[in-house]
Amino acid sequence: MRYLHTCYRVGDLEKSVAFYKQLGFEERGRMPIRDEAINVFLGLPGDEPRLELTYNFGVTSYDLGTGYNHIALAVDDLDALLARLKEAGIEPEKPPYRVREGGSRICFVRDPDGYRIELIEQSS
């Protein structure tokens, strides 16, 4: 068994794709689902497409529920990424912090639909 991907339903496909591209994802393909929806597959450089965005025609928002929390991405330079995101109008929920002393610096951003993305700075 192996992990394949995570799928989100989104209310504005192009806005969501643009957000994930700011995080470094690359669009790998689009697949129409009859006349109901379209899937966009995204992946990070050097990795398989692991994020699937589904846009159901005519649906502009979804309830996220209370069980879902976030996906996590390892980043080399959190400050540089946050500066690039800020230029694109994307602000973190709060400034970077450490959960415990000596731990990795983290912070969270939200995509256009409110899904949380944890950014974890990895030490070299």
Image (tube, rainbow, N blue to C red):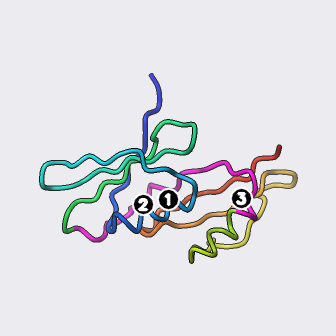
Q: How many marks?
A: 3
Q: Residue 106: x and y, percent? A: 71, 58
Task: Find the magenta span and give its range.
Answer: 59-80
**Mark 3, other Cα within 10 Å: few <14 / some 14–19 / many ≥20:** many
Q: Residue furthest left?
A: 35
Q: Residue 54: x and y, percent? A: 31, 54
- Identify the residue at horizontal 59%, vertical 50% (top origin): 72
Element class at badge 3: strand
Q: Which residue is mark 1?
A: 20
Please give left or right for residue 35 compared with residue 61 in the image. Answer: left
Q: Quadrant of the N terminus?
A: top left
Element class at badge 2: helix
- Identify the residue at horizontal 31%, vertical 48% (top origin): 30
Q: Which residue is mark 2?
A: 17
First in residue order: circle 3 vs circle 1: 1
Would you say the residues marked 3 and 1 are in contact, meaning their CB atoms lie under 8 Å apart?
no
Q: Disc number at residue 106?
A: 3
Residue 78 lies in the magenta-colored region: yes
**Looking at the image, residue 49 lies above or below residue 119:** above
- Identify the residue at horizontal 69%, vertical 51% (top origin): 75
Residue type beneath disc 3: Ile
Q: Quadrant of residue 11?
A: bottom left
Q: CA distance from mark 1 to mark 2?
A: 5 Å
Element class at badge 1: helix
Q: CA distance from mark 3 to mark 2?
A: 23 Å
**Mark 2, other Cα within 10 Å: few <14 / some 14–19 / many ≥20:** many
Residue type beneath disc 1: Tyr
Would you say the residues marked 1 and 2 are in contact, meaning their CB atoms lie under 8 Å apart?
yes
Residue type beneath disc 2: Val
Please give left or right for residue 24 compared with residue 100 in the image. Answer: left
Q: Residue 90: x and y, percent? A: 57, 73
Q: CA distance from mark 3 to mark 1?
A: 18 Å
